[in-house]
Image (cartoon, rainbow, N blue to C red):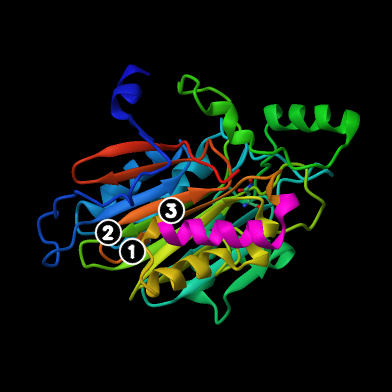
Amino acid sequence: MNSRRQFIKKTLVGAAAATAVSQAIAVPGSRKGVKPIVISTWDFGVAANKAAWEVLKDNGRSLDAVEQGVKVAEADLSNPTVGKGGYPDRDGHVTLDACIMDELGNCGSVAALEHIAHPISVARLVMEKTPHVMLVGEGALQFAMENGFERENLLIPSSEKAWQEWLKEKKYKPIMNIENKSFNTERLPGNQYNHDTIGMLALDAAGNLSGACTTSGMAFKMRGRVGDSPIIGAGLYIDNEVGGATSTGVGEEVIRTVGSFLVVELMRQGYSPEAACKEAVARIVKKKPDTAREIQVGFLALNKKGEYGSYALQSGFTYAVCDAQKQDLVIKGKHIF
Ligand code: SD4
């Protein structure tokens, strides 16, 4: 517990903070000038980044790094928003969404996948073994099982209990900015923070970018509902010439604005990662000002130079950064309203 607390160096980012710039040093064997780095959403990104760094520090490929990294969050049963242990839909089914994208523009995705604990690895196989980008529902499950994934029950007792509680009132309303529960409180392992999707972006020693995004989606969603996380361009986008972006929060608003693609295109136009994320958030506010007041959406971006930044609608968003020098958690204290 203590070692984790020491391991996390908290950094408060004020409203006027400049875009973060990686101070990382190159790992031995890196392409000249390349400083590998991995960033990911929320507190659980710290542990996930650590696994990704194991790949990056040995000159591994960013694609392998992001897959290994987000699998840590998928396997964490104390986390009710990603992988096994995720909260179910309103009918009690745990349905998972995930996507992955590499430096060549290859991508794979699964949506509404049930019974498989590591949807990110199924998404990668969709990318590598099929002529398609996206498989959903029964077809995705069939594909996973044909490829040796184990079918299991993903509804663990604590999530089932939370669902039973929810059934008493059955109010479907995404809880606004539930992540704020963890803001300004002690961050200790085992606490049941209601975190969110993990989106991860990595730059490897060869100078290549990849990303991954995985979630159980909005808790108690309608059966069949799919959010932004498995949608290439919405929940995740990588362009190896420019950078990558990923999102977290209420996916419907991110889909409407094709948020991650927008962030990358803004970086192409010269926006810093943070400025690009801020502009994408501003588009959401502009389109739906009333909705935007009641929800959380956050974007995280990394450019080709290893510069990173984020912006969220509401305060309370956190992300984790890991490179050869640091393993930090950045707490965003800013918000538009
Ligand atoms: C979704 N963006 O399904 C995901 C999950 C999430 O707050 O981040 N929820 O909309």
- The mark nearer the N terminus, 3 or 1, is 3
Is 6 rendered above or below residue 242? above
Magenta stretch, overall SS: helix
The residue that disc 1 covers is 303
Q: Amino acid at mark 2?
A: Gly
Q: Position of residue 221 (x, y in %)?
A: 78, 48
Label 1 CB sits under 8 Å from any ligand 1 atom: no
Find the magenta span and give its range. Answer: 275-291
Question: What is the residue that sits farthest to the bottom in this orientation?
Answer: 131
Q: Residue at x 37, y 36 (%)?
A: 329
Q: Check disc 1 and give the amino acid type.
A: Asn
282 magenta-colored: yes
* Badge 3 element: strand
327 with respect to 72 (left or right): left
Disc 1 packing (10 Å; few <14; some 14–19; many ≥20): many
The answer to whether mark 2 and mark 1 are in CB contact below 8 A is yes
Left/right of residue 60 with respect to residue 242 in the rendered view: left
The verdict on label 3 being within 8 Å of ligand 1 is no
Question: Badge 2 is on which residue?
Answer: 306
> Could you tell me the amino acid type at mark 3?
Met
Residue 97 in picture, x, y percent from top left: 62, 56
Q: Secondary structure at mark 2?
A: loop
- Image coordinates of residue 263 in percent, x first then y, are 48, 65
Earlier in the chain: of badge 3 and badge 2, it is 3
